[in-house]
Structures are given as C-alpha cells and as structure tokens.
Amino acid sequence: MCRYILGRLAQAALMVMGLLVLVFVLVRLSGDPINLLAPRDATPEQIDEIRVAYGLDRPVIAQFGEFVVDAVQLDFGTSIRYKQPVREVALERMPATIELGVAALIIAVGLGIPLGVLAGMRAGSRTDGTVRGVALLGQTIPDFWLSLVLILVFAVNLQWFPPFGRDTFTVGGIAIPDESIVLPAVALALFPMAQLLRFTRSAVLEVAGEDYVRIARSKGMPRRVVYRRYVLKNAMIPLISVLSLQVGALISGSLYIENVFAWPGAGGLLAEAVSNRDIPLVQGLAFLGGLITIVFSVLADVLYTLADPRIRLGVAR
Amino acid sequence: MSAPAIDADRGEVSGRVSRGWRALLRSPGGAAGALVFVALTSMAVLAPLVAPHDPLQQNLRAANSPPFWSDGGSWTYALGTDSLGRDVLSRIIYGARVSLAVAIGGVAIALTLGLVFGLIAGYFGGRFDRFIVSANDLVLSVPYTLLVIVIAAVVGNSLFNVILIFGITDVPVFLRVTRGEVLKLRDSTFIEAARAVGVPRRRILWAHLVPNLVGPLGTLATFEMSSMILYEAGLSFLGLSVPPSTPSWGNMISAGRDSLEVYPWISIAPGVAIIVAGLGLNLLGDWFRDALDPRTRRVPR
C-alpha cells in the first residue's frame, strides 16, 4: 500500500508540473503576453521596459524555467492592480474562502447525503421523484442568479441577513463570521449538494442490487438492518472521491458567489483580477486553485485505500 | 451476448428510430425536454419574427417598466424593460441565439475532436493512448470554471472565441467517454469477427464502432449542451463572453444587478430562461440514457 501511495504522490507531482505548463501556456494564448501586461497607452520605450522587467525578452524555454522556479516558491510577480506581490494578495484572501467553502460543504453534505440515501432506498417512489427533481434543479439553477434571488428575498424583503459583506464577532481572539455567511454559503452549497445527492442515490441503488444484499434479504434479515449494515457502509466508500471532487466545484462557485456577495475571499479576487486583466494575479490564483484540487484528489485516493479493505489488502490489485 | 450481423441492417435502424420517437412522446419527461429544445431552437432561429421589439432599441421614456402582472405593467412590454428601456422579453428571445450557438457549436467541436482522439487512443492504445489519457486527466483535474475564465480573460471576447473555448475545453469529457466505450467494444465478438474476416481497419472503426457510440455520445452531448448554456451565462455574467451590447442571458442578469432591489425583473427573467433551457436539456438527456440503456429502463438512475 505504501508503494501505491508513493506512486500516487509521484503522479500528483507530474500533475502539478502539467498544471504549471497549462498556466504558462494559457497566458501566452493571445500571442505576445506583453499586450496583457502593458497599459493601453504605453509608449514603445515603456513596453520595452516592461518586457525586460517580466523577462519576456528571453527565449520561451528560459522564461518557463524561471516561471517554474518562481512558482514553486509561489512567487508569481507583482499584482498590476494592488502593486503588491501576488502571493501576499492571494494568501491574505484565502481564509475567507476556506471559511465559506467549509460552511457550504457542511450544508451540501448535510442535505445531499441523507436525501440521496432516502431516494435510493425508495427508488421509483414519489419521494424519489421529488428528491430527484430537487437534484435536477440544483444542477440547472445558475448559482450567481440564485445569489441574487436570495439577496432579494432574504436580505432586501425579509431583512433576515445582510445583502453582502462579511461581518464577524470575536470569540477568544478569533474572528468568526456571523449570519452574513448564511446566504453565500447556501448559494455555494447548491451545486455540490445536487451532485452529492445524485451520487449517493445511485451508489445506494447499486449496492442494493449486489448479491450479498440479496442473500441477506433472502435469509429474512429485516430491510432496515440490511441497509444499515451492508448497503450504507459500502455505498459510503466511493463517496470519499466524490466529496473530493466537490472541492473543484466549490472553487469554481466561489468565483461567482464571492463576487455577488462581496465576500472578501480569493474567488472574488480572481473574478476581479480577470475583469481588470491583472494577469500575474490571475496566473497565481489559477495555479493555487488547481494545486488545491490536486492535493485533495490525492488525499481522497489515500483515504480511499484506507477505507476499502479490498484495495488496502491488495485483493483488487 | 450474441453477435449482431456484421453490417447493420438499415431498415431495422430506421424502424428503431421511429419507435424511438413514439417512445419519446410517451414519456412525460422526454416529451417535455424535447418540447423545450424545439421551442428554444425556433425562438433562436425565428427571433426577428417572434420578438415583439427590437432587442437593442432603447426607449428611455419607458425605462424600467415592470412586467405585465405587476402594477403599472402592460402587455406592450410583457416582461418589462431594462434601465435603457429595452424590452426584456425580446432580449431573452435574442439571447437564446447566443446560448444555443455556444451550446451547439461548442458541443459539435468537442464531440468531433473527442470522438476522433478517443477512437484512436482507445482502439490503438500504446504510447499515444498514454499521452492522451494523462493530458486528459490533467485538464479534467482543473476546476472547469477556473480554466474557462482564465482562457476567456486572455483571448478576449467574441462569440466565435467563446464557442471555440467551450469546444476545446470540453474535448476531454467526450474523449474519455469515447475511449471507455471503445475499450469495452474493442474485444467484443462482433468486432473480432469483423477483424477475422478481414474487414479493413478504417471500416471497422467507422462502420462498426462509431454506430455503437451514437447512444452514449448523444446522451452526453445533450447534457453538455445544458452545462454549456450555464457556463456561457456565467462567463457573460462576469463580462467575459459576448460584448455587453449583444443580448445574452448572462449579460442581462449582470446588467440588472445594480437595480436588483427596485427593478428585480431585469435580472430574474433571464435566469428563468436559463433554468428552463437547462431543465429541458437535462430531461431530454435523462430520457436518451434510459431509453438507450435497457438496464436502467425500469428504475431511473
């Protein structure tokens, strides 16, 4: 198993390398990146200066080498807008994003998994139909539009929550967000909730069709016991990887949600950097986002091997 | 599983298709999905005939008129007007053009490239396959919105670019499904039989493998169209898709943001259009999948 984990880590290192290539290439898609870095009204002399400052006068291979060396230290240059190192600007915004992501994940798991189990246990029933309808809606409602609707209903009309911003109260020197986190967390949870629900439902259905479940049922074991002992336990294992996939969904969603709710996190920062064409900042944040996703997928794979004895004991391999 | 005849009988295929149509109309979800898709397409194609107003025409005197059901609303502007007095309904109708162009164009590109590379990778295997699979996994590991937004920010916004961005970034999804299906089919009896009687490789690929991919890829294409409509709206919302002057659903939601509290319909109405389109395509996709996979016919998955 150690060998498997080591192999997975090596694979992840390759992925990070690939991610660096991707980020490097993407910024050069438009041809000469100088067009993105220089202000519109720059004189030819200024353009040359900027070109030298960013090392764009050197061969592409040298540029890439330097980019990798810098990127490993999370050094992505200076933000055009903030005139500060990208690393500082980006890391400063991370806690708020993590906070929001965790809150959304709690909502998504808390609703998605129980509803999925319920639907899976009663496949074909009216409950199942309703739950599947909820999942379908969750996957088709645009989260940024839902955010606006939530603001309109719960902030403007009912005035239960503030329409935007992050307010905190302090407990033992730690700032904890108050009810201002509720609306953005609900909006962000929508899509992962729908995905978890759909997945849990089909996992339960699939395990319920296995031979060992049929045998347990035919022995006369009560349905409830069969579900608790066999079906749920086995259906939960693949959930680990599905959960890790939600990290990507949360990062994607945070771009919009933080933008709409003016939540001071890294997602909103990226949305802002994109509209300002703050390319160094875009590059840094995109790399961070990809990196976090890769880290979680490795973590999920390792947990998976620990949770599934068939893999842990090397039976399946 | 018994091996089907080496050459698909054309008569049987067309019989299956017409039976499929009848089954589609019998299933409420499938029929609703098909209806939405047909409505959406006709709306986009016939926009100049269907739309009550010019979507770009401003009428500042009628700016921010409410929709017909609220006080002060009228049927002249059934869904109200925006801050420049442009008719929201007409803009939604014209907006369907952008959404559909991106969905159909993007899926066409992704499907074609994904099919070709997936076939080659899956059927021939080897080093090319390994390279393709790792490149594919890499792109799939990056959060999709992140990828699309960064590219859109760099290459700039025009309808053509947006279609191209979605088409190319979505190739991995089609490639993976194609490759998986090809791997399953490659060693099946009917392919083996075709190979044994000396059917040329190209003919095996196009006459035997590709027809078997129509089901899974068609289903996927429907779902991907629905996601592309959603993602395009997202790009538009951030101002990274078509220019703000072009009516698109995302642009409209974004334009209504500032006056959300007073004139909510400007943002709300186009969102409803996105949801209806997405629901329709998803229902159609669900129906495709269940109809084409006999195992799931009884209990929907």
Image (cartoon, rainbow, N blue to C red):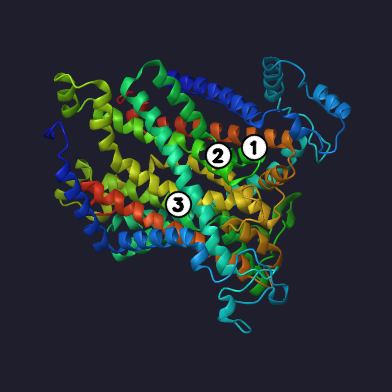
Instruction: Give the crowd class for mark 3: few <14, some 14-19, many >=20 residues within 10 Å.
Output: many
- At a point 46% along the width and 29% down the height, the residue shown is B136
Mark 1 or mark 3, which is nearer the start of the sequence?
Answer: 1
User: Residue A147's x, y, as percent?
Assistant: 60, 60
Q: Are labels 2 and 3 on one chain?
A: yes
Q: Label 2 lies in what chain?
A: B
Identify residue type, mark 1: Val
Whole-angstrom CA distance, mark 3 to mark 1, is: 24 Å
- At a point 43% along the width and 41% down the height, the residue shown is B108
Asked if disc 2 and disc 1 are in contact, CB closer than 8 Å, the reply is: yes
Considering every residue shown, the one lying at the far front of the view is B49
Instruction: Give the crowd class for mark 2: few <14, some 14-19, many >=20 residues within 10 Å.
Output: many
User: Which quarter of the rendering shows the N terminus of chain A?
Assistant: top left
- At a point 33% along the width and 53% down the height, the residue shown is B286
Res. B165 mark: 2
Res. A286 mark: none
Res. B226 mark: 3
In the rendered image, the vertical position of residue A262 relative to residue A6, given as above or below: below
User: Residue A58's x, y, as percent?
Assistant: 75, 16
Mark 3 or mark 2, which is nearer the start of the sequence?
Answer: 2
Q: Which residue is mark 1?
A: B155
Q: Label 3 lies in what chain?
A: B
Q: Secondary structure at mark 2?
A: helix
Identify residue type, mark 3: Ser
Asked if disc 3 and disc 1 are in contact, CB closer than 8 Å, the reply is: no
Is any part of residue A78 visible from this angle?
A: yes
